[in-house]
Image: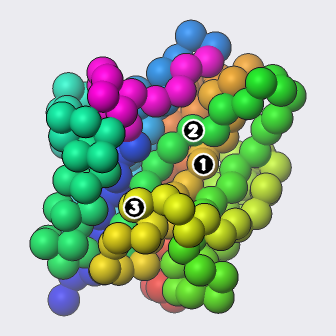
Amino acid sequence: MAIKVYIDQGHNPVNPNAGAEGNGLREQDVVYRIGQELATLLRQNGNFEVRLSRPTATTQVGNSLSDSLRTRVSDANSWGADYFLSLHTNASDITAASGVEAYAYRRGSQAFILGDHIVRSISAVTGLPNRGMKVRTNLYVLRRTAMPAVLIELGFITNPGDAALMSQQPELFAQGIYRGLLEYLDL
């Protein structure tokens, strides 16, 4: 039986719920491409079934911020996903801030363990600093999913180096997530 992975490419092409911007890039465009790359890797494997929150670059999810989040979670829950991976780029007023980090609802949970594998793997593949796993109980997509859910901050869109890497080599980030998932699942 296939392992069902829901890839949530965070944010929408336009408001409501558009993402961060930096270095001439938009978060929603960067994570869309990385999500597509990841979906391709998972589908080629044969052990996975994949659903994307944004199957096309113009897919708009929901009519408001809360509706967008609710729709993503509801879609994953009703599909019966085994894992929920929400892709994002980080942002900071400090342009030197760099690296990958991720969030789960609870420390010690399967999501936290999965996220740790993913963060370490992205860091190894991209060379970006590993900022670690963190707990966030206030994020709707972590709180309301019925399966292990990880929100991944792939890198800082406000850091020129991180931004260039995410924009020019999205396949590296997809590969990092993919390898982390395989390691977690022992595949």
Residue at 73 percent across and 20 percent down: it is 160
Q: Label 1 near label 3: C-beta < 8 Å?
A: no
Q: Which residues are magenta?
A: 11-22
Q: Considering depth in this image, is 138 or 42 the residue closer to the camera? A: 138
Q: Which tag, 2 or 3, sits closer to the chain's start?
A: 2
Question: Disc 3 marks which amino acid?
Answer: Val
Q: Secondary structure under badge 3?
A: helix
Q: Which tag, 3 or 1, sits closer to the chain's start?
A: 3
Which residue lies under the disc numbered 2? Answer: 89
Question: Disc 1 marks which amino acid?
Answer: Glu
Q: Is residue 154 left or right of residue 141?
A: right
Residue 131: quadrant of the picture: bottom right
Name the disc covering residue 141, or none: 3
Residue 20 among those drawn in magenta: yes
**Residue 40 in sight:** no
Residue at 30 percent across and 28 percent down: it is 16
Pair 2/3: label in front: 3
Whether residue 65 is situated above or below residue 105 in the rendered picture: above
Q: Which tag, 1 or 2, sits closer to the chain's start?
A: 2
Query: Looking at the figure, which quarter contains the N terminus?
Result: bottom left
Q: For the view shown, which residue lies furthest in the top direction?
A: 24
Q: CA distance from mark 2 to mark 3?
A: 16 Å
Q: Label 2 near label 1: C-beta < 8 Å?
A: yes
Which residue lies under the disc numbered 1? Answer: 153
